[in-house]
Image: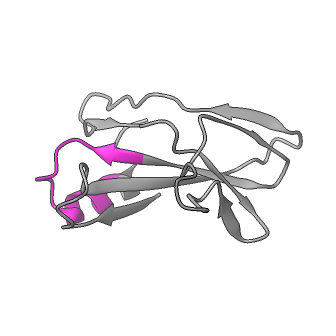
Amino acid sequence: MHPAFSSDEKLWYKSKVRCEFQNVSGKSVKVQTSKWLPGLNGVAAKIFPPTLQIRIEGRWFPNGYPIGSPDGARELHVPPTEFFRTLIALEDETIPEGVIKRRLEASTLGT
């Protein structure tokens, strides 16, 4: 997981976490957009479809190019050993970056 913070006023959600996964199942899997569960002491967040991307030859797709194309998908079919990722938008933008990083390391951010 990789936290990202921005002060860009054009962005609705300035605090985000990019979650990257690898398919180690040995077979192709279908991945769909899910929902975020903060748990007992976790952080409130949202997953906005379409945000799923798959890595092919070192590049992430879909990637918004050409201009106007989607930046992600609602569903992916991920072959064995390939990587996919999604973006989680944190609702409380007042949480300091250090707190988010510590919660990621302690696995107490949410599921």
Left or right: residue 73 versus residue 98 is: right
| Looking at the image, residue 58 lies above or below residue 35 | below
Image quadrant of residue 108?
Answer: top left
| Looking at the image, residue 82 lies above or below residue 43 | below
Q: What percent of the width, then of the height, locates residue 101?
A: 31, 62
| Looking at the image, residue 21 lies above or below residue 101 | above
Left or right: residue 98 versus residue 111 is: left
Query: What residue is rendered at 42% in x and 37% in y?
Result: 48
Query: What residue is rendered at 61% in x and 62% in y?
Result: 66
- Quadrant of the snapshot with the C terminus: top left
Count all numbered tags in the image, as a single digit: 0
In this view, the residue in front, 56 or 95, is 56
Q: Residue furthest right?
A: 27
Query: What residue is rendered at 39% in x and 58% in y?
Result: 105
Image quadrant of residue 7?
Answer: bottom left
Magenta stretch holds residue 89: yes
Which stretch appears magenta? Answer: 88-103
Q: What percent of the width, then of the height, locates residue 14?
A: 24, 57
In this view, the residue in front, 33 or 21, is 33
Q: What colour scheme governs how the chains and residues are painted in the rendered image of this protein?
A: one colour
Image quadrant of residue 52?
Answer: top right
Query: What residue is rendered at 52% in x and 54% in y?
Result: 68
Q: What percent of the width, then of the height, locates residue 3?
A: 36, 61
